Amino acid sequence: MPENASPNFIARFQGATFDDMVEALTEGFGSFDAWRNGREKPLDWKVGFWGDERVSLVSNQDSGGWGARTTHGTPETLAIIVPRTGALDVAFGRTVAEATPGRLFLTNNLELERVSVRAAPHRSDTLSLNWTIIAQTVAAVLETPLIGPMDLVPVVDRSTAAGQLIGNLAQTMIIGMRNNGPLLHSPIAMSNLMQAFADLVVRLVPHRLSHLLDRKIHLIAPRHVRRAIEFMHANIAQPLTMQSVAEAADISIRALEVGFRAFKGTTPSGYLRTIRLQAVREDLRDPSNRQPLRDVCLKWGFVHFGRFAATYRAAYGENPSDTRRRFNR
């Protein structure tokens, strides 16, 4: 099948008005703002979507000429847009990237400023992969927590070797999910494909942490550093001193410091603080977690709330309360 081909999909909703299309897409993407020039013009649209909170597929066909932006409270995902016909312009501040057939567009959905669908026959598929899968893959592949934005290069040319690999895997997932396909009934296969896709993105698509891939090839952390990291993760919620971490790794504090600076680019205490910040963020993003913010901080070892808030804001660009508000609407 040609890379820009897309088999017919069974529409869950279809119609001719813009407002009805926005309402239908909201069920597939979550809440977003949308606009159109000439709202009275018919769109002749149809929409289909499949999947769950881990991975979902939205297929959309319309006559174009509209735009949208993500609103606060929308679940964080890696959005993979596969244009089939027409073109989309995707804006990040002053940067605008063009998504056309033959290209893939990949981004964190919360980092988008807006998406504009040009006024022409438009058809696209959008895979959405839960961002937690990406963060976990970054931690596993690069051996460092993902703090702050990943800054993925958004456009992947499918004529390149990396583009072919990523594009073919995306197409496999799309075909397997479309029209209630077999992947939706094969959780193990779906899980393996999602993990493979996340791994390819982390390794092949340039991003803010890509330099760590080259470093990892040449600088494999020694056993005592790995033992210290394992001990930190296993006891992340316990009161830890660097003396106890050094003893668990069977080295001196000085050797522990030297090892972390050489192989992790930070101090042991800095590494511990980073993984604890990540644990706090995961709790704040969990709608089922109703613990007061101070209790969440204490749970992960942050006893000075004002100092914690400043550290969190420096890492993520928002206050802890803002994170909770975005994911608990």
Image (cartoon, rainbow, N blue to C red):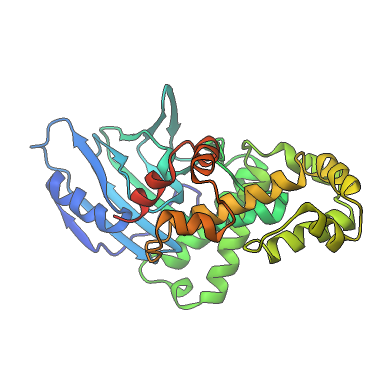
Residue 209 spot, x, y in % from top left: 66, 39
Residue 65 vs 203, above or below: the answer is: above
Number of callouts: 0
Q: Quadrant of residue 64?
A: top left
- In the rendered view, tell whether residue 33 sits above or below residue 125: above
Looking at the rendering, which quadrant does residue 42 occupy? top left
Q: Residue at x 25, y 53 (%)?
A: 26
Q: Nearer the viewer, residue 9 or 13?
A: 13
Residue 14 or residue 280, whichever sits in front: 280
Report the side of 193 relative to 56 (left or right).
right
> In front: 307, or 320?
307
Q: Residue at x 20, y 48 (%)?
A: 22
Residue 1 in view, yes or no: no
Q: Is residue 19 left or right of residue 146?
A: left
Q: Where's residue 100, x and y in %?
A: 43, 36
> Which residue extends farthest front?
304
Residue occupying the point 18% across, 53% down: 23
* Outermost residue toward the bottom in this view: 185
- Residue 139 position in % (x across, y down): 66, 53
Locate residue 47, reporting x and y percent: 26, 56
Decide if residue 182 is in sight here.
yes
